[in-house]
Image (tube, coloured by chain):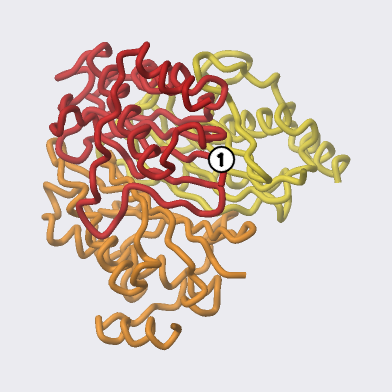
Chain colours: A red, B yellow, C orange
Amino acid sequence: MSDTIDSRLEALGISLPQAAAPAANYVPYVISGNLLYLSGQLPMENGTLAVTGLVGKDVDVKGAERAAELCAINILAQAKAALGDLSRIVRVIKLNGFVASAPGFVEQHLVINGASNLIANVLGDAGKHARAAVGMAALPLNAAVEIDAIMEIAL
Amino acid sequence: MSDTIDSRLEALGISLPQAAAPAANYVPYVISGNLLYLSGQLPMENGTLAVTGLVGKDVDVKGAERAAELCAINILAQAKAALGDLSRIVRVIKLNGFVASAPGFVEQHLVINGASNLIANVLGDAGKHARAAVGMAALPLNAAVEIDAIMEIAL
Amino acid sequence: MSDTIDSRLEALGISLPQAAAPAANYVPYVISGNLLYLSGQLPMENGTLAVTGLVGKDVDVKGAERAAELCAINILAQAKAALGDLSRIVRVIKLNGFVASAPGFVEQHLVINGASNLIANVLGDAGKHARAAVGMAALPLNAAVEIDAIMEIAL
């Protein structure tokens, strides 16, 4: 199963980054029982914020979908740091997708599909999650997208 | 108990719609242990989005409250699809109420009362939930309100 | 442990207010198994909303950080009402920090640090949480900040 996930990541051309360390009095993840709660992840790539601005004005849907993919990659990187091995993910329970939205932009669902598709492509049925996709006035550091997650894990 | 809920629904004039199928690589609900996580529901009625626009500009509080009621009805419809029978709901744990808000609109709590009241009226004490009500820049498909939920269920 | 928390609260000059009663068909908290879900808390102080308006326009980062501290104090007050004793908090799992944000304000993370620092200072390692910090169009009653929480508790 671990081999499968690694080979899918490779086939998708995804290499998980080193998980970012916490920057304050909070942490990237908390495990409680068999639940893994992951902090909101920004579209970081190679250590910098890759997609900034309001979607519908500074960023188009395609660019924002890519931002959502990067958030999902960072979620998987944090999950790997938490679990050692992504095959311990029994089920991705929920994604909350926050899209920094210009007035009148109403395709947050298409943006967050970037993350939903990536997670399902990497994890298979275990990656099929409930979700909410919503439009924000702004996000930290001017990120275009932020996504957090809850997962059920094998102990 | 199931009879009670059905009779309350009838007394309130609510008929639950067919639960909408997932439209992408995510699903309307995930069950993990005795927790049911429901995806964000929009104010769909008879298969179309019934209430659109920004509350405080395009939609008034009354209309938005109705939107929140429709979100709650769709949450119950998804819960019924997940559980077979709403009497398996032990407790509605949390509602997150997202209100598309025009600048200066600050009555998100009154809007989400539409959902809180409906859920409590249908489910009784099991429907008394924690919640957050917040104001969004915009929502998918220009929906006026989106609500997601977590419930404790009987296995 | 209870003594430690009380003495930390005293050292920090924090006295927990009487927890506010629910104002509608929802409740300030729900306990499900060993999880405590707390409703979104506003920056109430002495029974009134202490910090209102959009951060980045009506409120500066310092003022908003103080608002986040007040939200955290109200979270602890509700947790105390729920648990009797804050030493029953095994771990603060997640904070969701909602910051009412003027266009272009992108330091939601600094604002929510006010809550993260307070919770960690009061609860120690048990207070180190996952979190999301996001920017809202507006919040109920024109509050500058709203924060909700999930905690693991000892039964």
Q: Nearer the viewer, residue C69 or A15?
A: A15
Residue C37 on image: x %, y %: 52, 56
**Image side of residue C18 versus residue C36, left or right:** left
Q: Which residue is depicted at the point 55% across and 27% down? A: A126
Residue furthest out toward the right:
B3
In which quadrant of the rendered view does residue A19 lie? top left
| Residue A95 visible here | yes
| Residue B141 visible here | no
Residue B12 on image: x %, y %: 74, 37
Residue A25 on image: x %, y %: 26, 60
Secondary structure under tag 1 reads strand
Circle 1 residue:
B149
Q: Which residue is depicted at the point 64% across and 58% down? A: C33
Query: Please, is residue B43 above or below residue B122 in the view?
Result: above
Residue C70 on image: x %, y %: 30, 67
Q: How many marks?
A: 1
Residue type, label 1: Ala
Chain at tag 1: B
Location of the C terminus of chain B (image quadrant): top right
Query: Please, is residue A149 above or below residue A105 in the view?
Result: below
Residue furthest out toward the front:
A3
**Image side of residue B139 versus residue B27, left or right:** left
Q: Nearer the viewer, residue B140 or C110?
A: C110
**Image side of residue A51 versus residue A149, left or right:** left
